[in-house]
């Protein structure tokens, strides 16, 4: 089994020592995407039409904010394009981690219906070991593994279990999609029941769930709690996100938090009038600083936590 070297990130341009990542990371983003179910082309980041704008944004953030790493969670059935990710990474000079897995049920690909958990896990392991398609580019994370509602559907539970088995076999971590923040505890229970340690799990979109008790529960179990839709004010105000984040910090869980913006359509790009990938750094973190966060805490939230999540290095377990 070709597992990642301890302390190394598996990126689209090769393995990268985590000690080489000096600047902040975005823990849940999309650089290439196709979730267009309406035919209007809105939920798309097209390799031909939008990659140049994405690259320019990332390069600008590298220069302005020190952006060093993007965890790109576009997986099977979501319009993933590994070669475009590699080109964006090289041109922007920002490391990118690609993903494998399946999103939530409306976007499941046909093989899920007839395959069992072991067969699906085998599909993921082969992709992790051999690369995406014929590109040779290997995923460095499983995600965004999806469910919707408080309890995953049967196909979603099958995918979550398969992701956990593949993660255990390959040494990667699992990032989930919890639709509107719901279902995180059930996701974590399924994943850990398969033997995956909680500290190798990030539960997604928790900033969309106004329930500090659930956030504390997930963090106390050892999972990462992703506040990863920062700037998506049509779903949740950033002031509510800040309140929820401060509550989790006050509960002593600074080391369980991941931050990102989840740019998932071209209208969110800065060049099209959207908030852009830099909203976290330009707009949200200054408010967190005003609330008392010092530079060490900001580094923990935007860099060290993401590196520990991806590698498991530094966890006391």
Image (cartoon, grey):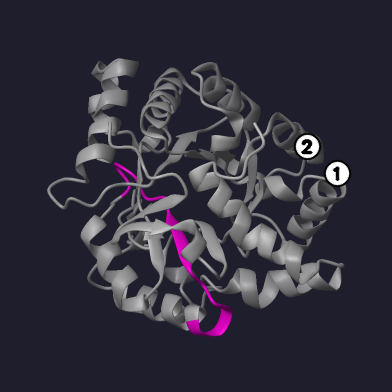
Residue at mark 2: 216
Q: Residue at x 43, y 35 (%)?
A: 104
Q: Residue at x 42, y 50 (%)?
A: 73
The foreground one among 294 and 34 is 294
Residue at mark 1: 251
Q: Which residues are magenta?
A: 63-78
The foreground one among 20 and 255 is 20
- Counting from the top left corner in percent of width and height, residue 51 is at 30, 72
| Residue 59 highlighted magenta (yes or no) | no
Say whether marks 1 and 2 touch (CB < 8 Å): yes
Residue 70 in view here: yes
Alpha-carbon span between mark 1 and mark 2: 7 Å
Residue 183 in view here: no
- Counting from the top left corner in percent of width and height, residue 120 is at 29, 24
- The quarter holding residue 101 reads top left
Determine whether, in the image, residue 293 is placed left or right of residue 174: right
- Counting from the top left corner in percent of width and height, residue 41 is at 32, 61
How dense is the environment of label 1, judged by Cα within 10 Å: few (below 14), some, or many (20 and up)?
A: some
């Amino acid at each position: 089994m070709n597992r990642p070297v301890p302390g190394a990130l598996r990126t689209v341009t090769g393995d990268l020592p985590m000690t080489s990542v000096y600047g902040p990371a975005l823990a849940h983003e999309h650089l290439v995407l196709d979730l267009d179910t309406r035919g209007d082309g809105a939920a798309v980041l097209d390799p031909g039409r939008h990659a140049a704008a994405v690259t320019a944004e990332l390069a600008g953030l590298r220069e302005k904010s020190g952006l060093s790493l993007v965890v790109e969670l576009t997986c099977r059935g979501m319009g993933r394009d590994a070669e475009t990710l590699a080109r964006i990474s090289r041109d922007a000079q920002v490391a990118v981690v690609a993903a494998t897995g399946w999103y939530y049920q409306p976007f499941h690909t046909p093989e899920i219906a007839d395959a069992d958990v072991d067969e699906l896990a085998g599909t993921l392991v082969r992709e992790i070991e051999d690369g995406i398609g014929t590109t040779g580019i290997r995923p460095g994370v499983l995600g965004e593994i999806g469910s919707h509602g408080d309890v995953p559907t049967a196909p979603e539970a099958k995918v979550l279990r398969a992701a956990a088995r593949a993660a255990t076999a390959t040494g990667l971590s699992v990032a989930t999609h919890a639709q509107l923040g719901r279902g995180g505890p059930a996701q974590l229970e399924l994943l850990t029941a398969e033997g995956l340690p909680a500290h190798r799990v990030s539960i997604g979109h928790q900033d969309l769930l106004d329930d500090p008790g659930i956030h504390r529960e997930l963090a106390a179990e050892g999972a990462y709690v992703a506040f990863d839709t920062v700037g998506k004010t049509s779903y949740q105000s950033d002031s509510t996100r800040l309140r929820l984040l401060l509550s989790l910090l006050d509960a002593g869980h600074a080391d369980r938090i991941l931050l990102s913006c989840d740019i998932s359509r071209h209208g969110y790009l800065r060049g099209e009038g959207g908030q852009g990938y830099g909203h976290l750094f330009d707009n949200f973190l200054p408010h967190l600083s005003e609330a008392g966060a010092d530079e060490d805490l900001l580094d923990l939230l935007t860099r060290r936590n993401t590196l520990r999540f991806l590698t498991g290095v530094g966890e006391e377990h």
